[in-house]
């Protein structure tokens, strides 16, 4: 384990976001366990700063929550009377931070446990993969608190579970458990209690070994292609494919397979 000292990362650590390097993986902790990792303005800014300043050697990242829960969402003690203009800027500050997670330099795996609620679920949805353990539960209490999502959840969450399920969660306060969350598409992996971080680190280490252009294409091109009309998507795909396969790293990997030096795909 290596911790990094850098003025921006030190400031982030003081505001509840800790970075440690685990080999090629940047492990980012939400570290405000006494408040269930509730996201106040300083913590959201710290998250943005950490993802904008990941160390060069990071090839993938993992986000986890310290304590018994991943994240309790927006820090409700900061929900003061804002006028409409201030509310827009507050929401936009979350968008910037979560875009730094989603569209940063490296793929991000969320290691989930306990509460993944409100803004915590919005943050998890900005990651590229989610690994949940058996203690995980998902909710959007915004509906019952008289507010709305503001951290990009209305854009990202329906892509995971559909508009109808998100509407239900907000209208009725419905909570999904870990098994249902995996079945519906919140998480791609489900582990026994206490094992989501190890699994997330294992996956992130593997992801960090991919060709960088493949990871770039999956993070930056795939979600945009999915939003494009099909004829635009086919063109973007062709451009991205040709760029990726022209990289020396791709040529070396294909050559290794043809020479019998690379692993075959194994039946799972
Ligand atoms: C908090 C927060 C918070 C805990 N803001 N302080 N999110 C919510 O509506 C979820 C609110 N939280 C909860 O439902 C529960 O705290 C949990 C299920 C997450 C965890 O329960 P538990 O029993 O482990 O902890 P606790 O005893 O409820 O909380 C421990 C402390 O954390 C306590 O403070 P203390 O000073 O009395 O010790 C809680 O007040 C504090 N705490 N959650 C502030 N969220 C961009 S828009 C996004 C909009 C939203 O995210 S709305 C959803 C907000």
Image (spheres, grey):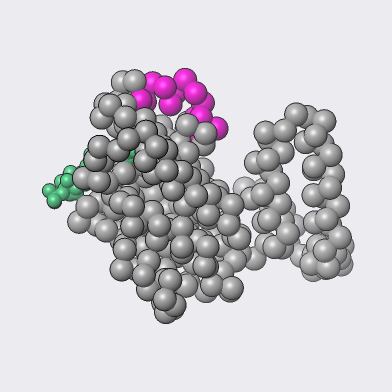
Q: Quadrant of residue 168?
A: top left
Which residue shows up at 72% across the image and 56% down it?
A: 214
Q: Is 93 on the left-hand or right-hand side of 139?
A: right
Q: Nearer the viewer, residue 149 or 35?
A: 149
Q: Is 193 on the left-hand or right-hand side of 251?
A: left
Residue 12 picture location, percent across and down: 37, 66
Which residue shows up at 47% across the image and 72% down it?
A: 21
* Magenta segment includes 195: no
Number of marks in picture: 0
Residue 123 visible from this viewpoint: no
Which residue shows up at 64% across the image and 50% down it?
A: 219
Residue 192 picture location, percent across and down: 37, 49
Residue 140 picture location, percent across and down: 34, 32
* Magenta segment includes 168: yes
Which residue shows up at 56% across the image and 62% down it?
A: 60
Compared with residue 105, is residue 84 higher up or lower down, i.e. above or below?
A: above
Q: Is 212 on the left-hand or right-hand side of 239?
A: left
Residue 135 picture location, percent across and down: 31, 44
Report the image quarter containing ligand 1. top left
User: Magenta span: helix, strand or loop, mainly?
Assistant: helix
The part of the chain drawn in magenta is: 157-170
Which quadrant of the rendered structure holds the N terminus?
A: bottom left
């Amino acid at each position: 384990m290596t911790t990094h000292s850098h003025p921006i990362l030190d400031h982030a650590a003081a505001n509840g976001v800790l970075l440690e390097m685990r080999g090629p993986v940047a492990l980012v902790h939400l570290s405000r366990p006494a408040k269930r990792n509730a996201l106040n303005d300083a913590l959201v800014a710290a998250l943005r700063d950490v993802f904008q300043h990941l160390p060069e050697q990071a090839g993938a990242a993992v986000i986890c929550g310290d304590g018994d829960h991943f994240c309790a969402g927006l820090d409700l003690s900061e929900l003061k009377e804002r006028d409409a203009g201030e509310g827009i800027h507050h929401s936009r500050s979350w968008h910037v931070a979560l875009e730094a997670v989603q569209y940063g330099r490296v793929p991000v795996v969320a290691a989930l446990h306990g509460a993944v609620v409100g803004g915590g679920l919005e943050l998890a949805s900005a990651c590229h993969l989610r690994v949940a353990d058996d203690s995980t539960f998902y909710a959007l209490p915004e509906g019952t608190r008289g507010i709305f999502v503001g951290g990009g959840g209305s854009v990202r969450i329906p892509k995971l579970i559909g508009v109808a399920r998100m509407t239900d969660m907000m209208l009725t306060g419905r909570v999904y458990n870990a098994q249902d969350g995996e079945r519906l598409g919140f998480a791609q992996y489900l582990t026994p209690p206490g094992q989501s971080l190890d699994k997330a680190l294992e996956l992130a280490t593997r992801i960090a070994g991919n060709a960088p252009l493949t990871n770039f294409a999956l993070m930056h091109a795939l979600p945009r292609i999915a939003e494009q009309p099909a004829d635009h998507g086919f063109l973007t795909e062709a451009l991205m494919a040709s760029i990726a396969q022209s990289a020396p790293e791709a040529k070396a990997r294909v050559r290794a397979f043809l020479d019998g030096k690379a692993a075959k795909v194994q039946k799972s």
